[in-house]
Amino acid sequence: MAKLFGFSIEDPNEKKKKGVISPVPPNNEDGADYFLSSGFYGQYVDIEGVFRTEFDVIKRYRDMALHPECDTAIEHVVNEAIVSDSNDSPVEINLDNLNVSDKLKGIVRDEFKGVKDLLQFDKKAHEIFRNWYTDGRLYYHKVIDTTKPDEGIQEVRYIDSLKLKFMRVRPSQEKGARGAQGIPVLPYSGAETITKDAKIEEFYTYYPQGMAQKFGSVAGKGVRIAKDAITYVHSGLVDRNKKITLSYLHKAIKGLNQLRMIEDSLVIYRLSRAPERRIFYIDVGNLPKVKAEQYLRDVMMRYRNKLVYDANTGEIRDDKKYMAMLEDFWLPRREGGRGTEISTLPGGQNLGEITDIEYFKKKLYRSLNVPPSRMDGEGGFNLGRSSEILRDELKFTKFVGRLRKRFSRMFHDMLKTQLILKNIVTPEDWDIMSDHIQYDFLYDNHFSELKETELFNERINVAATAEPYIGRYYSQDYIRRKILRQTDIEIKEQDELMKQEIADGIVPDPMAPVDPETGMPLDATGGDPNAPMMEPDLESETLVKEMPKGGEI
């Protein structure tokens, strides 16, 4: 392998894993399978035709997104996940669980803001999330100054999903070959992929003209980019048979096709059955067949009404040279019949039935995890009790939360690259810190807010009911943990805040003695408010100073 384009960040843990072997290859759910190297530089065999299949799948997803019903469902998901606000950013970093110094937290927050500025996320958040949700994958090229890598990422560039592919290539092994340290390698098992000595190559291949829609290898036509130079975020859905990353739109393919077919068939049926058509029985007497046909055509051209409406110009013109599919019927009738007669065929009945269309539309929405109640604005927004909230809305809220967690990996990868390149943290430190960094998105699901408010009210009411029994049957700690559902961290934080507010005089001390008559807290000395007033000391310094000046009366 020649030197790849871009940059690589060395993982210090790679040395620790050296010599680890297993006959089972690792489960990499990134949509990239193991490809065999052919021995000639720059060539490998795409046995399964993944490129062609993946190209078709992405094109299908994008065509689906243009359909009105599917586009509406996608917008529901994107609008819930990305909440745009004039004052707040759609996403902020949360470092509350990170056990580092405040100075380092401030640096990490600044770098995260820099990552958002590079992405222009506050302006393009909706488009970025929609592209990721539709394609099921998202690529960004992290551009750095190779002469000054410690300055971090200088620019991020979006890469079309049809032009980039993540590859994992392993060297070909002969049957009976031995791997690292002379350990036999199981033939055709991929066991060598587990050993770090096997030199598994992971890289991206960029095709400026787009991936070719054909079989065979196309590696030689693209540019290989190092793995760490690309930010890759996928949906997490993988076709385990074909090793293809899927989009959340994948399971809606059949439902959308069925909806399209039923709508087209309904239109054709109504166009053909809606109008009333006439049957003209023309008496041709004893005319020969040829002359009878000529006479029938003459009568038809004489009485036929052929006014057409031009939708482009808005004109109505007589156009008799075109045959329409809603023509009347002209039938000859021989001598001895009832003569010339005109009858009418009735139009189609029950043309207003669209139950089947509503069924397939709801099926499409359910396949996209969008509540059917949101279809066409059905079911007004209810600001009542949480018991009136549909269960589908709660499921939808959880689904959006999972999407946000998966999508936030984009920030995670860029932030990692930025902190390591600028020598703010080491790769070892990042491995420890990464699990404690979270990303908070703005929330706009009022159904979930109503649910939380209702639960909070119920807990407060139960706690108030159980208050007389505190100290007799239950402890205060039990009430806080079991009824109010406070965690250890929340209990500690609330206790500290309450002490501080009491010390600052913001709230009265609930443990202080209280006057039984007035309900006001007593002074710190615990004196009796009903005690008789003491005579003032007229000789005190304060009263002397306040005495008016003047002579004796």
Image (cartoon, rainbow, N blue to C red):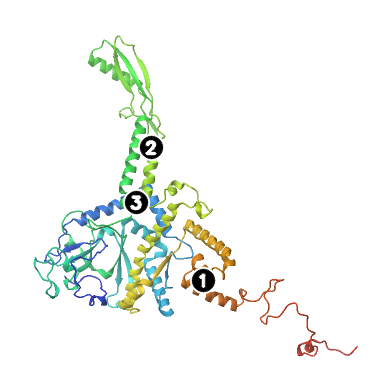
Q: Residue at x 53, y 75 (%)?
A: 495
Q: Which residue is mark 3?
A: 65
| Residue lying furthest right | 553
Q: Which residue is mark 1?
A: 477
Image quarter where the N terminus lies is: bottom left
Count of numbered tags: 3
For marks 3 and 1, give the one nearer the viewer: 1
Q: Position of residue 447 (x, y in %)?
A: 48, 56
Q: Is residue 288 above or below residue 368?
A: above
Q: Amino acid at mark 3?
A: Ala
Q: Nearer the viewer, residue 126 or 495?
A: 495
User: Mark 2: few, some, or many residues within 10 Å (few <14, many ≥20)?
Assistant: few
User: Mark 1: few, some, or many residues within 10 Å (few <14, many ≥20)?
Assistant: few
Q: Is residue 311 above or below residue 73?
A: above
Q: Nearer the viewer, residue 469 or 181?
A: 469
Q: Earlier in the sequence, mark 1 or mark 2?
A: 2
Work out how far the residue at label 1 is from the one at label 2, CA to CA, in angstroms. Answer: 76 Å
Q: Amino acid at mark 1?
A: Asp
For marks 1 and 2, give the one nearer the viewer: 1
Q: Secondary structure at mark 3?
A: helix
Q: Earlier in the sequence, mark 3 or mark 1?
A: 3
Q: Position of residue 387 (x, y in %)?
A: 50, 53
Q: Residue at x 17, y 54 (%)?
A: 215
Q: Is residue 549 above or below residue 308?
A: below
Q: Amino acid at mark 2?
A: Ala
Q: Nearer the viewer, residue 364 or 318?
A: 364
Q: Which residue is mark 2?
A: 311
